[in-house]
Amino acid sequence: MKLKSYIILLFFVANINAFSQIVLMQEHVDSTYEKHQFGVNQRHYLHLFIGLGFSFGDSHGQGLVTKFGGTSTYDLALRYKLKLNNYFATGIDAGLNGQYVSYPVKDPIEKDKMNITSLKYAWFFRINFGHRGDIMGKFIDLGIWGTNVLDSYLIIEQEVENQDYRIEETYYRHLKIFNPFNYGLVFRMGWNQFAIFAEYRYSEIIKNQYLNQKRLVPEWTVGLQIGLHR
Amino acid sequence: MKYFILIIASVISMLSSTKAQTKQWVYFTDKANVNYNPSKYLSKKTIEKRLKQGISLNQYSDWPLNQNYIEVVSLLSDSVGFQSRWFNAIVVWTDNERIAQIQNLPFVLKTELAQPMNSVLADFKTEDADTDDYQLLAEQQIELMQGQLFEPLKIDGSGIRIAIFDGGFPNVDKAPEFEHIRNAGHIIATRDFTKNKDFVYYSSTHGTMVLSNIGGIWNQHKLGLATNAEFLLAKTEVGLEPFAEEEYWLAAVEWADQQGADIINSSLGYTHHRYFRDQMDGTSLVARAANMAVSKGILVVNAAGNEGEQSFWKYIGTPADADSVLSIGGIDPETGYHISFSSYGPTADGRAKPNVSAMGKVVVVSKKGITTAYGTSFASPLAAGFAACVLQMNPNFDVHQLFDAIQKSATLYPYYDYAHGFGIPQASYFTQARHENTMATFRFKNNDNLVDVEILNHVEYIPGQRNYLYYHIKRPDGKVIDYGLVDVIEKDAWALNINNYENGDLICVHFHGYTSTFKIEK
């Protein structure tokens, strides 16, 4: 432990005796010789990451509904990485995922939005490229993911007649229309803290019996994840 | 889904094709059938230096490489880069398949990946101040080493050739602070190893700042001590916080030797981007190159690093970890002890580093003019300038004598720790033959499990008077396990509970120039 601030100690704690001085520096050296098991490019590593993605494309061939940028996902999660050797690693993610879906106004009267908060988890296999020291380096990840919906809203915007075309939003919470479990594949390409990801969702956000052209969500999401580590 | 598979397949294919072509060091087994004439390869200055230091002119490591070997390897490569005489190796770009073929050649010893890597010491902070502050700090950076004592003796680095490895030297060809160097024709040679050309007066201002702290003069104030030295300027870094490559450093060090450098200042280092902490044991390629430079009579001065405040890596990088490199830590001018960002030792194999320290907050000349800068990058050239003065005063010193003398001249010697090394080199050691203080300033008292330090002739404490007591506890093999620094207020200055230590461990204390050791016996 290093103490660089001026702290007047009436009792010199490290030596348990009554001496008076200002401790300016105190260093212990033993640990510097050890090879660590925990670290960015050590055997085990755990870090937080945040992610932002945008959905695009078709929804399982049923026709494009949202515009790119109209549907976004947010992640705040923990990632555990187990280094297998200099080239391969595996790991798991667990955290919160938020999904916001906004459809373009097709109907002049009504517009839908959806807010879904889920517990998201994933398993991935990592391939590293190039020699590196104690840094994340360049890598690609292939993995599978799943989500369990924790909270969901369907928001319907309507123009209120006879009130100067004011828009009114109505919130519907915990509707049974949402699939409680979603799953898919993920691919990531990263360099140190930054990773571009592409996710494919096999499942539909909305249960089949409630699906219609207004409530389809594209199955592709691309975005950026930022690892909150050095 | 088919798009997903397509994207993944293309990315993997792209990455694997990138991986296929790699940059490799190819080491040869021998230098058979080559001709070497030292007088054609080495400069007159190098020959004189080697003769003076009793170093052989005909060293195997100076012999050229076997051109036939290079030609055969080049047939299995896309291109051939730097050729190192010292390591009998060349850098090639080739693919994995051909690497296997190269490895099977009878004259190839081994191949090794030559990856780009980040150097870390080019990172520095600057701060503008007013003229008075610059003047005060400029005086302080010289006086902390007692550099003013060299002045009346006309010791200014005359006749000493200093090579600087850095990221660029913009404005050195124009700035008035270097006019005396230019007018005297003291920029002997320049080389940009990153672009393979001679022009170096561009790119990162870091090298300009470093040069200013060896030989710059601002408003008649010396910013470094070797204002009359000769300089070799080598650009070895690609940018400000660049992807430099070890081969540039290696190429520059061989060039500097050929050009007759007495001292090399290298204010850069490599840490976690390429290495793990346990690899900082002086065995990296640049560390080995630095050691070889020392064996050829060149003092290599290297900044300890600016990682001291990092939680994940606060240790010195390489080549500061090399055994024969004089590694320089940073001192805070406001407190007079370790500046917080200065990297700590020891090396991974437990050798004491840094060796000595100099000011880590300094006045420098940048490409925009005078400014204040922070970093061991600037402590290192201050020490290099000091070394040039010592060498000028003691022309018969070989590189090891020079290295030892600088350590012995430092403020804390024979005490050392892994933050300050032996302290700040002092000119009075050379100009006035100052030696270690043998007048006791404290004494040890042993009471049961406590070892107390009592100050002799204690005077009333005045805040800010720097009544510093340095201590370390080391094993009998010399490896320090605990160390620290306290500002003493009372007569009973410090105490240690020896229950935490082993029989035979040594307590070493330094106070006001006096060092004494107490052996723990239970």
Image (cartoon, coloured by chain):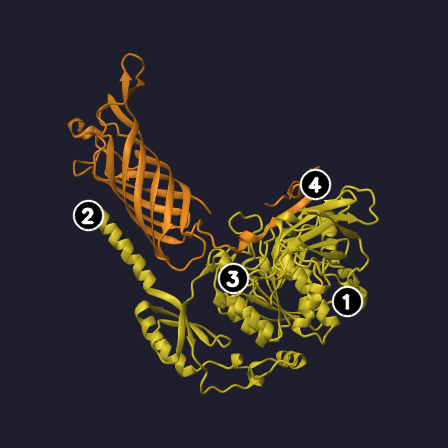
Chain colours: A orange, B yellow
Whether residue B386 is visible, yes or no, is no
- Mark 2 or 4: the one toward you: 4
x, y (%) of residue B322?
56, 65
Q: Residue at x 35, y 54 (%)?
A: A84
**Are labels 2 and 3 on one chain?**
yes
State which chain disc 3 sits on.
B
Check disc 4: other Cα within 10 Å, few if <14, some if 14-19, many if 20+: some
Q: Which residue is mark 3?
A: B237
Q: Which residue is mark 4?
A: A17
Which mark identifies residue B2? 2
Amino acid on which disc 3 is placed: Glu
State how far apart marks 2 and 4 are (Cα). 73 Å
Amino acid on which disc 4 is placed: Asn
Residue B275 vs A96, above or below: the answer is below
x, y (%) of residue A31?
54, 52
**Are labels 4 and 1 on one chain?**
no
Quadrant housing the N terminus of chain B: top left
Amino acid on which disc 2 is placed: Lys
- Mark 4 or 1: the one toward you: 4
Check disc 1: other Cα within 10 Å, few if <14, some if 14-19, many if 20+: some
- Mark 1 or 3: the one toward you: 1
Check disc 2: other Cα within 10 Å, few if <14, some if 14-19, many if 20+: few
Could you say whether the residue bearing mark 4 is in a helix, strand or loop?
Answer: loop
State which chain disc 4 sits on.
A
Circles 1, 2 touching at the beta carbon (< 8 Å): no
Q: Residue at x 62, y 51 (%)?
A: B501
Could you say whether the residue bearing mark 2 is in a helix, strand or loop?
Answer: helix
Q: Residue at x 22, y 47 (%)?
A: B3
State which chain disc 2 sits on.
B
Q: Earlier in the sequence, mark 1 or mark 3?
A: 3
Q: Earlier in the sequence, mark 2 or mark 3?
A: 2
